[in-house]
């Protein structure tokens, strides 16, 4: 297989923290507090401004030929939803998911585009619906005379609609760095964090199904419905593969070595059960176990403030 061909690099004002691709559109989150949408021609077709701190994670929601829905999680504790019209360029802020008490480190959308999950430095994972609310939803608070939690309307700082979470998952000790949905079952999510654990959750029952422990901090998590494996990136530069169906706590199925610094991003191929990408603090993006790679693009972003797009050739 020939090395990927560099197609273009799109300059940003600050570090790029997160990149996603869907239907020929490229979504980026940056430390300049902005979310940007790019097309294949290298044009920034939309800039979403609303966060008061760095954007850590971005994700696509439902989209069609006329509209794209995007989400962003930030260090300002908020998760925002936006829509962009591909026909007239109109953009709109849909709502804010409010409830985290710490920075949001990672967000993920389920396969049906009906749920979005957020992992936070406040040690919790929250699940939200992706539909736009007609009015503000009541927020949960623990301050009540009887000592029980109750819901109330919170004071708004803007005109944006406020959304409350469907469920909160608690169990991690320390910041939760990553979240990934099971492609075949939207009721299952996988998370990883600073407590060196990878956890499987049932969000309907709000229970931690399986906990797997390793030697180092978990920086990113991605699940493949093809291989039925979880891939995780760590602070010891090792890429690990796990079988979530096993109930053993430390059974690493495979450890992939080659990076020389922290692995901050992992992504399975959507067309092959054998292939995945990883991004590292060593300034490289690596493709692993390349037997029949069929992805059209590999996209990356980092400290150099550039969104880089590569096209693969077989």
Image (spheres, rainbow, N blue to C red):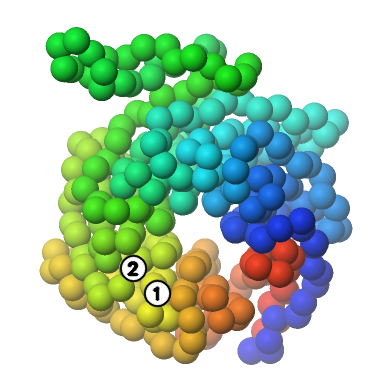
Q: Can residue 242 be seen in this view?
A: yes
Local packing at callout 2 (Cα closer than 10 Å; few below 14, some 14-19, many 20+) is many
Give the numbered dot on residue 235: 1
Q: Where is residue 23 in the image (x, y as percent from the top left)?
A: 68, 51
Q: Residue at x 19, y 59 (%)?
A: 211
In the shown orientation, is residue 144 left or right of residue 51?
A: left
For mark 2, give the secondary structure: loop
Q: Nearer the viewer, residue 297 or 58?
A: 58
Disc number at residue 217? Answer: 2
Q: Which of marks 2 and 1 is nearer the N terminus?
A: 2
Q: Which of 294 and 264 is in front in this view?
A: 264
Question: Residue 161, image x and y in percent?
Answer: 56, 19
Which residue is drawn at the image coordinates 53% and 84% (left, top)?
290
Quarter that holds the N terminus: bottom right
**Picture quadrant of residue 152:** top left
Measured from the top left, where is residue 298 in percent x and y?
65, 70
Q: Is 176 situated above or below 313? A: above
């Amino acid at each position: 297989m020939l090395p990927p061909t560099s197609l273009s690099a799109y300059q940003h004002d600050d570090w790029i923290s997160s990149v996603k691709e869907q239907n020929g559109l490229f979504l980026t989150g940056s430390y300049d507090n902005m979310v940007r949408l790019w097309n294949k021609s290298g044009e920034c077709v939309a800039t979403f401004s609303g966060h008061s701190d760095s954007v850590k994670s971005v994700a696509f929601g439902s989209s069609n030929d006329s509209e794209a829905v995007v989400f962003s999680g930030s260090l300002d504790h908020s998760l925002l939803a936006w829509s962009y019209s591909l026909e007239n360029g109109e953009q709109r802020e849909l709502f804010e998911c409010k409830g985290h008490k710490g920075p949001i480190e990672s967000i993920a959308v389920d396969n049906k585009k009906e749920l979005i999950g957020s992992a936070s430095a406040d040690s919790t994972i929250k699940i939200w619906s992706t539909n736009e609310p007609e009015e503000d939803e009541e927020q949960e608070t623990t301050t009540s005379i009887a000592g029980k939690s109750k819901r109330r309307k919170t004071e708004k700082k803007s005109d944006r609609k406020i959304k409350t979470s469907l469920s909160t998952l608690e169990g991690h000790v320390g910041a939760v760095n990553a979240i990934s949905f099971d492609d075949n079952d939207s009721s299952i999510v996988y998370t990883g964090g600073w407590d060196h654990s990878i956890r499987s959750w049932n969000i309907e029952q709000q229970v931690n199904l399986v906990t797997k422990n390793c030697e180092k901090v978990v920086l990113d998590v991605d699940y493949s419905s093809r291989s039925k494996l979880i891939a995780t990136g760590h602070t010891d530069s090792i890429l690990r593969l796990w079988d979530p169906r096993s109930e053993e706590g430390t059974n690493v199925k495979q450890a992939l070595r080659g990076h020389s610094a922290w692995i901050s991003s992992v992504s399975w191929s959507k067309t092959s059960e054998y292939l995945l990408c990883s991004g590292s603090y060593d300034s490289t993006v690596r493709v692993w176990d390349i037997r029949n790679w069929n992805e059209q693009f590999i996209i990356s972003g980092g400290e150099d403030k550039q969104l880089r797009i590569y096209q693969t050739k077989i």
